[in-house]
Image (tube, grey):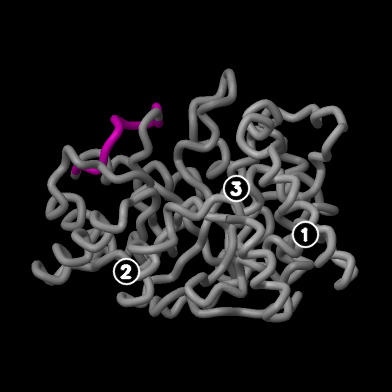
Amino acid sequence: MSIRREFGSTGLEVSPLCLGGNVFGWTCDEQASFAVLDAYVEAGGNFIDTATVYSTWVPGNVGGESEAVIGRWLKARGNRADLIIATKVGYPGDPHMRAGLDRANIREGIEGSLSRLGIEQVDLYYAHKDDPATPLDETMGVLSELVDEGLVRTLAASNYSAGRLAEAIDVSETHALARFEGYQPHFNLLERAELEGDAEEVCVREGLGVAPYFTLARGFLTGKYRQGQDLPATPRAGGIANEYLNDRGWALLAVLDEVAAAHGATPAQVSLAWLMQRPSISCAIASATSPAQVAEIMGAVGLELTDAEWAKLDAAGR
């Protein structure tokens, strides 16, 4: 289903469902990653999200594994021109560079990403985490240079507060620099704080594309966690149990089940459809470790909730 949406005012035409690359080189080995990427493209997807820091949390990994897997897949398939590739720079803990968004770090970051991805230009380049220690004019200055040099097509920010996002845009406009045109917050039915309110107002006012991550609450909103059942044997299960296995979480799952049954859909599809129908959001990021999971998440594209269903879900998640 090759539905496309404009990502803010960037001119990028993207699938409403962006494939997250955080699992590549982690819970998804190279063969499985290729199968997932193939299934996503075959289902009509064109937007792939990764980062230099994926997946440093895995013992033996050094970071950049996800980019390298995607790069080898792009080379094998010869389909670079059909895809929108997003990656990120400057997240603390990335062994490829010091933490932060200073000039040297960003230059080192883009060189490494382009090399691992095997491409000449990144379509969407995120400042992965705000760096208060580096002046915004330095950060935005070097990012703007990457756009001028054709190494990056469009800039975006992730994990920025509303105030810092607005300030960065002001700095760019004051100095006639390329500015942030997109925003990637942590946002889903159960996690609202990073986008709702001031940040969403900035995004709407400035016409930014918005692509939230952890859209399925790290798996809880898929419905695989059930009251009275053993936890799934996954690396995230313990943390999810601490955050979401409570009265609020169970109540939301009950509403998800109700709406899913009405549409012949799954809780994951309904969760993603709710998010994609929010006016400020351009697309949802979700990851998959098998073609079957790709088919499920892509099934959310085109799923239309009624206004009453959307509102009921919205209220249940608060």
Three-letter code for the amino acid on which mark 3 is drawn? Gly
Q: Which mark is residue 256?
A: 1
Q: Could you say which is closer to the camera, residue 291 or residue 301?
A: 301
Q: Which residue has dot 3 on it?
A: 21
State the separation of the CA atoms marked 2 and 1: 30 Å
Three-letter code for the amino acid on which mark 2 is drawn? Val
Q: Which corner quadrant holds the C terminus?
A: bottom right
In the drawing, does residue 189 fall left or right of residue 112?
A: right
Q: Which corner quadrant holds the N terminus?
A: bottom right
Quadrant assignment, res 297: bottom right
For the record, the magenta segment spans 94-102
Q: Secondary structure at mark 2?
A: helix
Query: Residue sitting at 59 percent across and 62 percent down?
Result: 284
Magenta segment's dominant SS is loop
In the drawing, does residue 141 fall left or right of residue 66?
A: left
User: Residue 209 lies in magenta, yes or no?
Assistant: no
The residue carrying pointer 2 sits among few (fewer than 14), some (14 to 19) or many (20 or more) residues within 10 Å by Cα, namely some
The reply to whether dot 3 and dot 2 touch (C-beta < 8 Å) is no
Q: Which mark is residue 202?
A: 2
